[in-house]
Amino acid sequence: MGNKEVISSELMHSLFFNEFDWHEEFQTSSKRNPFSYERSARQTNRAYPWYAPAPYVKAYFEQWNEVHLNIGTLFSNRNKKEASIEMVYQIGYFIEALFWINEEMALVGLWQEKFTCIEIAPINGKERLQYVIDHYDHYTAFVQLRELVNDLHKKWMKNEAIKKSQSE
């Protein structure tokens, strides 16, 4: 058995981690694992997405535009296992974007408590996101995640426009 990093409770969530490490699907994937920046923030002292989120958030929305069609196809083709794996990634990336937009570290283990403190968020986002987390392997959760992403994108674009007009 290899060395296992103990994950702090503020980063621990059963959808993304088992007791000490990434779930198996994450360990073998070539994709960036959700919350990898937050895990490495404890070890290094470099700039992170929550300090200057715009390029990371822009990349997230571009990535979502490419992948969401694939998730819909996976569910349509009744490929529930692959759809579920992709949904877990996308839920993680959504939580990251949600907190980074608000210039906060995405502490997934505390997301419910921290959600009440963020300003830029979808309406009823906490309840809707909890539904997505609880039912990530259902098509209806995918539809709800798609709507959450669209709502967050609109709010982020509005906030960016306000910041730009204030700086001019």
Image: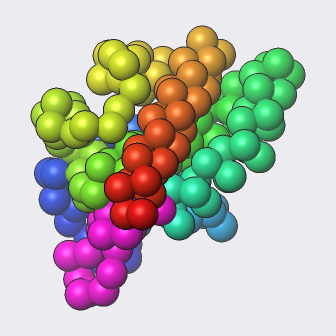
28 and 69: which is toward the camera: 69
Q: Position of residue 43 (x, y in %)?
A: 23, 83
Q: Position of residue 28 (x, y in %)?
A: 60, 63
| Residue 85 seen in render | no
Q: Position of residue 45 (x, y in %)?
A: 24, 87
Q: Position of residue 120 (x, y in %)?
A: 33, 38
| Residue 60 seen in render | yes
Q: Which image quadrant is residue 67 in? A: top right
Q: Is residue 80 above or below residue 26?
A: above
Q: Which image quadrant is residue 131 in? A: top left
Q: Please name the predominant secondary structure of the magenta segment in the image.
A: loop
Q: Quadrant of the N terminus?
A: bottom left
Residue located at (16% from left, 30% from top): 116
| Left or right: 45 as drawn, with respect to 139 | left
Farthest residue in the top direction? 140
51 in the magenta segment: yes
Q: Quadrant of the C terminus?
A: bottom left
Farthest residue in the front direction? 168
The chosen color scheme is: rainbow
Start-end of magenta stretch:
37-54
Q: Which image quadrant is residue 46 in? A: bottom left
Residue located at (65% from left, 67% from top): 30
| Left or right: 10 as drawn, with respect to 71 | left
Q: Is residue 117 above or below residue 2?
A: above
Q: Is residue 133 above or below residue 3?
A: above
Residue located at (83% from left, 28% from top): 73
Residue located at (40% from left, 26% from top): 122
Q: Is residue 159 above or below residue 78?
A: below
